[in-house]
Amino acid sequence: MRADTNISVTDALDNGRQSGIGPGAIVLTADGELPVEWLSVGDMLVTRDNGAQPVLAIVRQRGLTACGTVLPDPVVLFPGDCVTTVKPWEKLRLAPGHRVLLRTSLVQQTFGLDEALARPGDLTRRRAPRPDPAMGPLTYFHLIMPRHELIMAGGLWLESTCPDMVRRLGKDVPPAAAQSLLARPQQTVRPSLTSHQASLLRQSMPRDLSLTDLFAA
């Protein structure tokens, strides 16, 4: 029997979720791969659905959320078979609420979907993300594009900044960039798993399957 398949395609990011791409992430642009720190407004990012699309604005959050609380530690994704030899730049650090594309057969079997978005913080078996001492001061990068897109970072497809996060960033986002994104129908680029649905998926995952392998499947 399949689990609840009533997955909303509206922007379901709730007020308690923090998105953002962490330092060192390697993002795929039309000119090749670049560290997220090197990106500039106007750079063209490769998207899954709409070819190369421009970055309208980049917001850097340092230390605190838009509400003034401390930024949550990131979930760190890297190849599961090289835990002891992985280089710092091979790690993809994401805020716990930054959604990543799932294409695994587990999503099809459980929810009847070929693709869905899920938050790594909902899928990790850890009770809370573990601080990464190699990271230094925590900064999250928000890449605002004309629409909600799937972009590639660290070899995985993940979301660009969603409309709800743009609203919460408020005045930190240039008005023209915010208007471009918020003027579109408020839908996520793919159906998004709720925390409960992600929990069901996590319970069905093989114990030896890492988050990176799950997202890369």
Image (tube, helix red, strand yellow):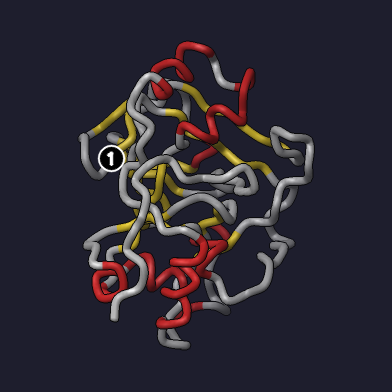
Residue 10, how many percent across, how many down?
38, 41
Q: Does 152 sit above or below residue 147?
A: below
Check disc 1: other Cα within 10 Å, few if <14, some if 14-19, many if 20+: many
Q: Which amino acid does label 1 sit on?
A: Thr
Against 127, residue 12 (above or below) is above
Q: Quadrant of the N terminus?
A: bottom left
Q: Is residue 172 above or below residue 64?
A: above
Per the image, label 1 sits on a secondary structure element best described as loop
Quadrant of residue 93 within the rendered picture = bottom right
Q: Nearer the viewer, residue 87 or 153?
A: 153
Residue at left offset 49%, top offset 78%: 82
Residue 2 percent location from the top left of the image: 30, 76
- For the residue pair 151 and 193, the one nearer the viewer reads as 193
Q: As drawn, is 184 to the left or to the right of 128?
A: left
User: For this view, does 125 lie left or right of residue 191?
Assistant: right
Q: Which residue ends up furthest to the bottom in the rendered image?
A: 207
The residue depicted at 31 percent of the width and 48 percent of the height is 190
State which quadrant residue 84 falls in: bottom right
Task: Report the residue marked by disc 1.
Answer: 47
Residue at the extreme top of the image, as rendered: 176
When asked about the image quadrant of residue 171, the answer is top right
Q: Quadrant of the C terminus?
A: bottom left
Q: Which residue is drawn at 21% across and 41% down?
A: 49
Going 35% across and 37% down the picture, which residue do you hit? 187
Asked if residue 31 lies left or right of residue 196, the reply is left
Q: Where is residue 195 in the image (x, y as percent from the top left)?
A: 51, 62
